[in-house]
Image (spheres, rainbow, N blue to C red):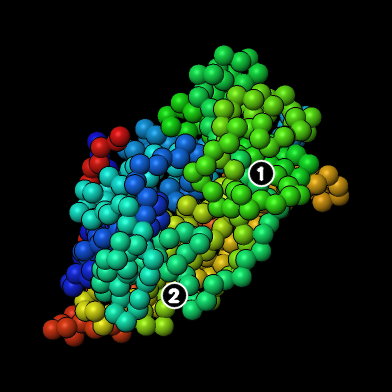
């Protein structure tokens, strides 16, 4: 199957890079760095068999990265294209309004808003890594990271050394402690997220739910202090669902949990708060995955003082679970890092390239954390004046008269800063930085050579 154009720039010097964490972010970073010409080892404490059935949002900025990696055939088979966001009242199901992603607008962005199952994306990234030659070591828990020289120590006692350690070890990151020299203060939040998915075959047997299996919508119910949303994933075989709500009790049992499952009755939900379709979906769930999280302060650096450890993904930007952009930020991190490190001419280039990565990504990461918290708060407002103002704004956007000619400018006027995230191009940001600053780096035996344009090639990848 035809693929898409991807970068094949290779570093002149191959570095040995240790990636801590075999999650989506770790595999993405490993793939881009190995593709850039380096020797990458991924160290994952689990056995690699866990596959979450939860759904992920792939906004245009993320879809753009996946497409550049040649994954359009996979997206066509397993991801679902979203054409509009449908907002409804949680208690009644009455429609508040629509946010349409019209063809003309998506054409401006050069990428779609899509839904992808977490397990599907993890599997395809694993396949990419194996094809590229990344070494994957499971059941390899890292208990220590050193910077002089760059090395990691495993729970088994084994020590591995390299030129660079990439910390992709998530919210409770050991690598982040090394970079910052301290453990970040944490504040518990009152938000609990329940994630689950339902076979669409079950939904098609219910006349109230059947239409949800035929829509390309992101269906979003806004209730009194809760958010409930669902979308199709996995070739329309499953319907992925999130319920986020406030809980006035200790949530430490569910802190950053992605593997333990509970029956939905465990949470004593008041079904009177939900419209009938939502109640039916909750009752169809055999088990749900509950996740709470800690809020942490924004960090001022993602690189250690000796330029031996760099943070990617939620190690760098711990976001609220099940937001719009967490996975997108991970893939952007990986793309920027891989693009920059495809230009390595000498180990002396590492500090400058890491400085470039930090310069490109830090403000973006801070903005994403702020955006996710603001949007989650806005979507889980209690009944009152603010909630009414929010609903009125959504209705006003729905009444826009020229949806058939919606473009980026019109979308921005109505929906504000969403578009700022959608138009971000991680590859372009990295290449622009290199064009501006790359000449300051070492160029052994070719001091006067002009930086050549990035070569490209058409590739194919089979869909799984």
Residue drawn at x 51%, y 60% as measured from the top left: 171
Structural crowding at the residue carrying mark 1, measured as other residues with C-alpha within 10 Å and reported as few (<14), some (14–19) or many (≥20): many
Position in image of residue 413 (x %, y %): 66, 54
Tell me if 305 is positioned left or right of 35 in this view: right
- Residue bearing mark 2: 178
- Residue bearing mark 1: 244
> What is the C-alpha distance between the residues marked 2 and 1?
32 Å
Tell me if 268 is positioned left or right of 292 in this view: right
Name, please, the residue furthest toward the front. Answer: 156
Position in image of residue 114 (x %, y %): 48, 41
Position in image of residue 326 (x %, y %): 51, 54
Front residue of 282 and 151: 151
Name, please, the residue furthest toward the right. Answer: 385
Q: Earlier in the sequence, mark 2 or mark 1?
A: 2
Query: What is the number of callouts on the image?
Result: 2
Structural crowding at the residue carrying mark 2, measured as other residues with C-alpha within 10 Å and reported as few (<14), some (14–19) or many (≥20): many
Residue drawn at x 51%, y 46% as measured from the top left: 258
Front residue of 70 and 268: 268
Disc 2 vs disc 1: which is toward the camera? 2
């Amino acid at each position: 199957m035809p693929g898409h154009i991807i970068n094949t720039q290779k570093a002149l010097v191959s570095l040995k890079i240790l990636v801590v964490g075999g999650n989506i972010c770790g595999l993405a970073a490993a793939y881009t760095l190995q593709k850039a010409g380096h020797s990458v080892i991924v160290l994952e404490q689990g056995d690699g068999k866990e596959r979450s059935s939860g759904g992920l949002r792939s906004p245009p900025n993320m879809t753009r990265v996946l497409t550049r990696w040649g994954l359009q055939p996979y997206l066509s088979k397993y991801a679902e294209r979203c054409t509009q966001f449908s907002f409804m009242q949680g208690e009644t199901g009455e429609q508040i309004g629509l946010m349409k992603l019209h063809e003309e607008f998506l054409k401006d962005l050069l990428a779609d808003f899509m839904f992808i199952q977490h397990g599907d994306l993890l599997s395809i990234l694993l396949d990419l890594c194996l094809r590229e030659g990344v070494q994957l070591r499971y059941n390899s828990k890292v208990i220590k990271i050193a910077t002089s020289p760059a090395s990691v120590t495993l729970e088994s006692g084994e020590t591995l050394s390299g030129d660079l350690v990439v910390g992709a070890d998530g919210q409770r990151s050991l690598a982040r402690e090394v970079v910052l020299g301290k453990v970040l203060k944490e504040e518990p939040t009152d938000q609990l997220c329940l994630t689950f998915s339902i076979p669409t075959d079950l939904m098609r047997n219910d006349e109230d739910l059947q239409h949800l299996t035929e829509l390309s919508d992101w269906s979003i119910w806004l209730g009194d202090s809760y958010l409930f949303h669902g979308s199709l994933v996995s070739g329309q075989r499953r319907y992925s669902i999130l319920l986020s709500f406030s809980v006035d009790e200790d949530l430490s049992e569910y802190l950053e949990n992605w593997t333990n499952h509970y029956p939905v009755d465990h949470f004593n939900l008041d079904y009177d708060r939900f419209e009938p379709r939502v109640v039916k979906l909750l009752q169809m769930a055999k088990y749900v995955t509950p996740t709470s999280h800690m809020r942490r302060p924004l960090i001022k650096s993602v690189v250690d003082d000796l330029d031996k450890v760099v943070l990617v993904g939620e190690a760098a930007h711990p976001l609220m679970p099940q937001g719009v952009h967490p996975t997108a930020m991970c893939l952007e991190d990986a793309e920027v890092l891989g693009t920059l490190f495809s230009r390595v001419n000498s180990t002396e280039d590492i500090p400058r390239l890491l400085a470039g990565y930090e310069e490109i990504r830090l403000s973006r990461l801070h903005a994403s954390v702020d955006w996710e918290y603001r949007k989650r708060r806005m979507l889980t407002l209690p009944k009152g004046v603010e909630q009414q103002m929010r609903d009125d704004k959504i209705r006003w956007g729905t009444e826009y008269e020229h949806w058939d000619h919606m473009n980026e400018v019109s979308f921005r006027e109505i929906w504000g800063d969403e578009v700022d995230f959608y138009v971000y191009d991680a590859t372009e940001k990295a290449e622009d930085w290199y064009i501006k600053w790359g000449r300051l780096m070492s160029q052994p035996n070719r001091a006067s050579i002009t930086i050549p344009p990035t070569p490209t090639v058409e590739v194919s990848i089979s869909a799984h």
